[in-house]
Amino acid sequence: MSLPSVSKGDAFIFYGLLKQGAAGMPGHIDLETAGTFEHPCRFRAKMYDLGGFPGVVAGDTLCHGVIWRIKDVSVLAELDDFEDVVPGNRERSVYWRDTWPVRDDMGTATGETAQIYVYRASLEDWPRVADGNWPLGKGRSRKMGDV
């Protein structure tokens, strides 16, 4: 299975450490230069607390995110690396980039879609984030092997 293609101007939903101002945000990725943080958004998923960073899988909770629009697609390799995506190998990836509908505060689809990093590893021992809103101050830096 291949990752969705990305072009300049495509939207992403960031819901955890990639949100603007999040604790644990990767300092080596210049998100402010490579794209534009546009506005809060919602999406339907189940969000889990993975011990300092969140992960989402398909579900019905109305979760909170932010739309980030990519200007410089060369940053995509850094984003995928940060999210432990193994290009061309979904099974070995910790997260996988997918395309989901963007929703408004009432949960209604806006007609826009955005790419989102979906968690792929086991969630058996991790607690749910019941309100689907990852707090900006709760994060910590992610490293491969933390999950």
Image: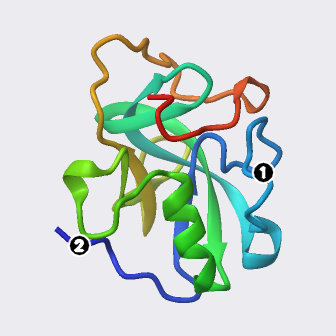
The image position of residue 124, as x and y in percent, is 27, 15
**Residue 2: mark in rendering:** 2
Quadrant that contains the C terminus = top left
Q: Residue placed at 51% from the left, 29% from the top?
A: 146
Towards the viewer: 54 or 74: 74
Residue drawn at x 61%, y 40% is: 16
| Chain-order first, disc 2 or disc 1 | 2
Q: Quadrant of the N terminus?
A: bottom left
For residue 14, side relative to residue 25 (left or right): left
- In the image, residue 109 lies at what x, y percent? 39, 56
Q: Which residue bears the numbered disc 1?
A: 20
Looking at the picture, which amino acid does disc 1 mark? Gln
Q: Secondary structure at mark 1?
A: loop
Q: Position of residue 51 (x, y in %)?
A: 56, 19
Q: Nearer the viewer, residue 139 or 145?
A: 145
Q: Are marks 2 and 1 in contact (CB under 8 Å)?
A: no
Label 2, secondary structure: give it.
Answer: loop
Relative to residue 79, is residue 2 depicted above or below? below
Residue 34 is drawn in which quadrant? Answer: bottom right
Judging from the image, the colouring scheme is: rainbow
